[in-house]
Amino acid sequence: MIEFYNVSLSYNGKRILNNITFRILKGEFVYLIGASGAGKSSILRMIYFDDFPDSGTVIANQFSSAKITAKEIPYVRRSLGVIFQDFKLLPDRNVFDNIAFSMRVTGVKPKEIRKKVLRMIAELGLGPKRNHLPLELSGGEQQKVAIARALVNNPFILLADEPTGNLDPVASMEILEILQRINSRGTAVLMATHNYGLIKKYPHRTMKLENGELVEQ
Amino acid sequence: MSLLFSIGEGIRGMGKARLAMTLSVSSMILTLLLLGSYLIFALNLNQWITDLREKVEIEVFMEPEARQTSIAQVKQALEKQPEIETVQYVSKADAAKRFEEEFGQNIYDILESNPLPPSFIVQLKEPYRSSKKIMELAAGWKNLPEVDEVVYQKMLLAALENYIRWIQLGAVAAGLFITIISISLIYNTIRLTVYARKDMIYIMRLVGATERFIKRPFLVEGLIQGLIAAVFASLIVFYGVKIVKTFIYPYITMDNRIYVGMLLFAVGIGFVSAGLSVRKYLRIV
């Protein structure tokens, strides 16, 4: 599924990750923790091939960072979902269109888009907010829209970069419960977070980044 | 479906980034006006040069007492030459008449006999109106029977050829300069519209849109912007030419191909600039 072999990465001459090796299996839930700037987001970016290691290899869904071509990258990205702390929603589109966007850009037929998006909206309890713009939603609701957008293409893994970073404790808990539910259906989750309280509430395999090294906890 | 999506996104994008779009279309209109004005200038300059060259006449003077057989021979020889457009024979009597028209005096009031020689006024076809070619032809005509001399406006022709070369070179340089300025101005303003939608580009990349797919809405946008700018610029040029013709310079020439050129330039540059801007931006985000 996801494999890192001796991966090192530097930014502006500063080494962020040093010889990191790990594997995430199908259906796993993994936390990635560490201080700010420790390289958590860099690990996620390398999984969706937005960044490449200086040395070592990253393998995501059988595509290797050493061999992948620019043309193949979009197809790998369609097989994984990504959510962020700042949601990255399109502010001029309502809930339905934000979720549908990821299917439209991959050329899915309108009928199928409608069916899947409505199902996703219902599943995440966004029904009454279907025609609302992101700015009319709470932080928790915006993150739900982002999750729906990430899931609508049935990814094998959901990459969550500090998904609760902008949310209050209640909304954070709700988001984590959604992620648990998604995971229980077989989608792997890799969540980078600072929120140790949530980890205690829902314990899973945890990897900690410390001085560029990875420590399993 | 995906093409419709791209067109929809392109139109939507223009509505969203209104300021950037207005800037972009305005700069396109300005540069098109510059380009249009230049093309009109070049067209009129060319027309002026053609008119001037048309006025260059060559006079082939016969001996004052040339025989009719020689005159007929020369006429036939001149008419046979492929470089010649028209040959007009001016008899001694015609020459006397022209003298009277020009100087207001009858030649017979001044002299006892008419000393004016018969001649031929020759006009060359457009491609042969250079001093070099005229010199060549004149040398040949001098050997025809009873031809006294061949006269043409050497000075005017030399001046035309000397200055026109520089004027044309200057016009070409100005045209190139305007084109480069236009391209860079339009390219940079279109980049603004692309930048205004960097979030959308990022999200498209994130959810697995191909580069080609991401580019399409921007290409559509570039095309539409070019089209809008071309329509506005053409209208301004159309009425501008009308005003100039009515109030300033009635001889101004306009060619519809200039409108077509402006349209193609605007649409082409909108399309190419949008493509380049997104490509560049895709490397960054």
Image: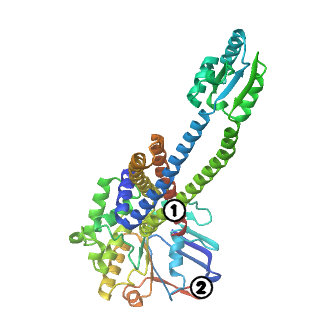
Q: Is residue B101 above or below residue B165?
A: above
Judging from the image, what secondary structure is the residue with disc 1 in?
A: helix
Looking at the image, which is closer to me, B87 or B80? Answer: B87
SS for dot 2: loop
Query: For mark 2, does the 10 Å Cα neighbourhood hold few (<14), some (14 to 19), or many (20 or more) residues?
Result: many
Q: Are marks 2 and 1 on the same chain?
A: no
Residue placed at 26% from the left, 63% from the top?
Answer: A118
The percent coordinates of residue B101 (x first, y second) are 56, 28
Chain on which label 1 sits: B
Residue farthest to the left, as pictured: A128
Label 1: how many residues lie within 10 Å, few (<14), some (14-19) or many (20+)? some
Side (left or right) of A108 relative to A44: left
Q: What is the residue that sits farthest to the top in this orientation?
A: B69
Give, as a three-letter code, the residue at label 2.
Gly
Give x and y (percent) for residue B50.
58, 37
- The image quarter containing residue A11 is bottom right
Residue B111: % across, % down: 67, 22
Q: Amino acid at mark 1?
A: Leu
Q: Between residues A134 and B9, which one lies in front from this camera angle?
A: B9
Q: Nearer the viewer, mark 2 or mark 1?
A: 1
Of B48 and A101, which appears nearest the observer?
B48
**What separation in Å lies between label 2 and label 1 (alpha carbons)?**
46 Å
Residue at mark 2 = A212
A73 in relation to B271, above or below = below
Would residue B87 be visible to someone looking at this image? no
Residue at x-position 59% and y-position 88%: A211
- Does residue B124 appear left or right of residue A176 in this picture? right
| Residue under numbered circle 1 | B185
Q: Is residue B112 visible?
A: yes
Q: Is residue B112 above or below residue B157?
A: above
Q: Tell me the tag on residue A102.
A: none
**From what the image shows, is residue B256 above or below residue A78?**
above
